[in-house]
Amino acid sequence: MLAAHVDMLHKAALSNPIENVRHVSSLAMSQKRAIIRHTSMRMAAYENERPGAVGLSHAWPSRRSAETVRLGDAIGKAASAGDIVALAGDLGAGKTTLVQGIGRGLGLDPRDIVSPTFTIVAEHAGGRMMLYHLDVYRLGSADDLQDLGFDDYLHASDGLIVIEWANLVTLALPDDRLEIEIAAGPKSGERQIHAQPLGPTSAKLLNRILDILP
């Protein structure tokens, strides 16, 4: 669905700065009680900067790629058609590794899943549902994602949509999505993978994930 637009937008995106359109809520950190420890404050801030946050967020530690894949596998097994997973994290954080695990949970060969940095989107069939894997790192803005026909995927509702660098195109995303951020953990070489649902559908997805991998 995006093929007709990708080459043109790719050339434009290479020359455009990446616009970070991530919204931060007006809830001030001063509202948090002083007795909350630093790590708890960080998790609270992560939750509160998403105005549509539903319920509590959850975090898993990951010390090696296999643990990230294991979490992704749980997400893939728990996902339903129409779910949207929005990934954020620095270069090399493990976003694509997580998507490979998601693919495995859907019944796909994870070796076939690589980050579609230049093609923007990769469609994977052959599992229990379609996997639409997007990497929007090279897009100039949220408007560019809309121009590529992103709504076609939203209306298809026949698979799972997973977006790497989703924090760069927040304005183009549906309100109800599961946001996952991969960040450095408290220990050397450790990652913390934080999940936050932003609506009732994504909250149900998180609950199903926790049934598989608490």
Image: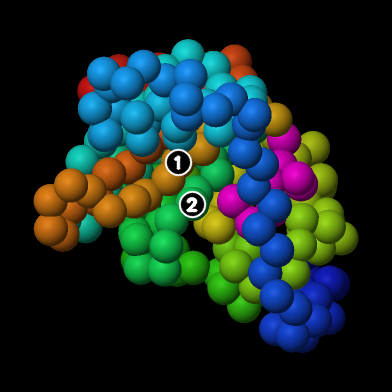
Q: Is residue 184 visible?
A: yes
Q: Please tell me the numbered disc located at residue 109.
A: none
Residue situated in front as seen by the camera: 81 or 149: 149
Q: Residue at x 66, y 41 (%)?
A: 23
User: At label 2, which amino acid type do we have?
Assistant: Ala
Asked if the residue at tag 2 contacts the one at tag 1, i.e. Cβ–Cβ closer than 8 Å, the answer is: yes
Element class at badge 2? strand
Q: Is residue 186 left or right of residue 83?
A: left
At horizontal 62% and vertical 78% (from top left) the residue drawn is: 118
The residue indicated by pointer 2 is 88
Which of 40/58 is in front? Answer: 40
Reply above or below: 178 against 164: above
Amino acid bearing label 1: Ile
Q: Residue at coordinates 48% horizontally, 19% vertically from top-left?
A: 31
At mark 1, the secondary structure is strand
Task: Examine the rendered structure and indicate whether residue 71 appears above or below residue 163.
Answer: above
**Which residue does the image show at 41% across and 26% down from the upper left?**
44
> Dot 2: within a 10 Å radius of its alpha carbon, few (fewer than 14), some, or many (20 or more) residues?
many
* For residue 26, side relative to residue 78 (left or right): right
Q: Quadrant of residue 122?
A: bottom right
Query: Magenta includes 196?
Result: no
- Residue 78, image x, y percentages: 41, 28
* Residue 151 position within the rendered picture, expressed as x and y whole percent measured from the top left: 81, 46
Which residue was labeled with disc 1?
A: 180
Give the mark nearest the N terminus, 1 or 2.
2
Magenta segment boundaries in residue numbering: 167-174
43 is higher (above) or lower (below) than 162: above
Indicate the position of residue 145 as horizontal and vertical percent values.
77, 58
